[in-house]
Amino acid sequence: MPINADYRGPGELPQIIPVFPLPGALLLPRGQMPLNIFEPRYLAMIDDALRDGHRLVGMIQPDVAHSDNADKPKLFSVGCVGRITQFAEAGDGRYILELTGVSRFKVVAEQSVLTQYRQCQVDYFPFIDDFTARKGEDEVDREALIEVLRDFLKANNLKVDWDGVESAPNEALVNALAMMSPYGPPEKQAMLEAPDLKTRAEILIAVTEMDLAKKRTSGDPGLQ
């Protein structure tokens, strides 16, 4: 989905952004993430993001496994900033919105703020390639990706719009499948931090193959 703002590099994004810690949530550049916002602190975050004109929110996973404070868990060091590209009021106090991914970021430092939501100083320069659409997609093993997708769908009795899959560019396909994948925070974080699209696809394929093998050998529900 195109967005009105044209971000050509890290210097065009603010260094301090609000962050939304959400386990299992994976946003990637140019990917779309629907969100249902109902907690007061995050309603306030969205109000402020719309008010300041940037309309940017950083999606990041809490690192629950290494956190002592359940109310304010430690954050993973890498997230992805997205721009609010769709927004609606549900009529019952909720916001329904969609974020379009812009760039990954590395957390430099969490800020001491008066807002109920958390804010971080971030650095986009380690992921400068995120600003170039479809970079490296020719190196993706599309055939292997499609094959593991077929196996996953068959194993889980699911269907997909194959016309849409066949027409999707490699970047859109890899990122959409990664974002929609049913795997846990460690696997999602590995795909987020992948250095390039080829590696992200390889991680997705490997994780899916391990999940399918586990189901075949043990009958367990697999990674969730």
Image: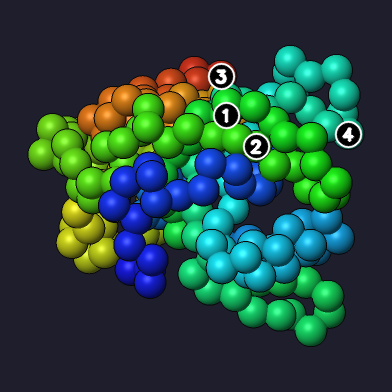
> Label 4, on which residue?
71
Rendered position, 143 above or below 1: above
Asked whether residue 105 appears in the rendered view, the answer is yes
> Label 1, on which residue?
107
The mark nearer the N terminus, 1 or 2, is: 1
| Secondary structure category for the residue under label 3 | helix
Q: Give the CA distance from mark 3 to mark 1.
A: 39 Å
Q: Which mark is residue 120?
A: 2
The reply to whether dot 4 and dot 3 touch (C-beta < 8 Å) is no
> Percent position (x, y) of residue 82?
50, 54
Q: Residues within 10 Å of mark 3 (few under 14, many from 20)?
A: few
Q: Give the CA distance from mark 2 to mark 3.
A: 43 Å
The mark nearer the N terminus, 2 or 3, is: 2
Write the residue at 78% across / 48% down.
117
Q: Which mark is residue 218?
A: 3
> Percent position (x, y) of residue 62?
69, 31
| Secondary structure category for the residue under label 4 | loop
| Secondary structure category for the residue under label 2 | strand
Write the residue at 58% across / 26% down.
108
Give amino acid for label 3.
Ser
Give amino acid for label 1.
Val
Query: Between residues 133 and 224, which one lies in front from this camera angle?
Result: 133
The reply to whether dot 1 and dot 2 touch (C-beta < 8 Å) is yes
Query: Between residues 148 and 189, which one lies in front from this camera angle?
Result: 189
Give amino acid for label 2.
Cys
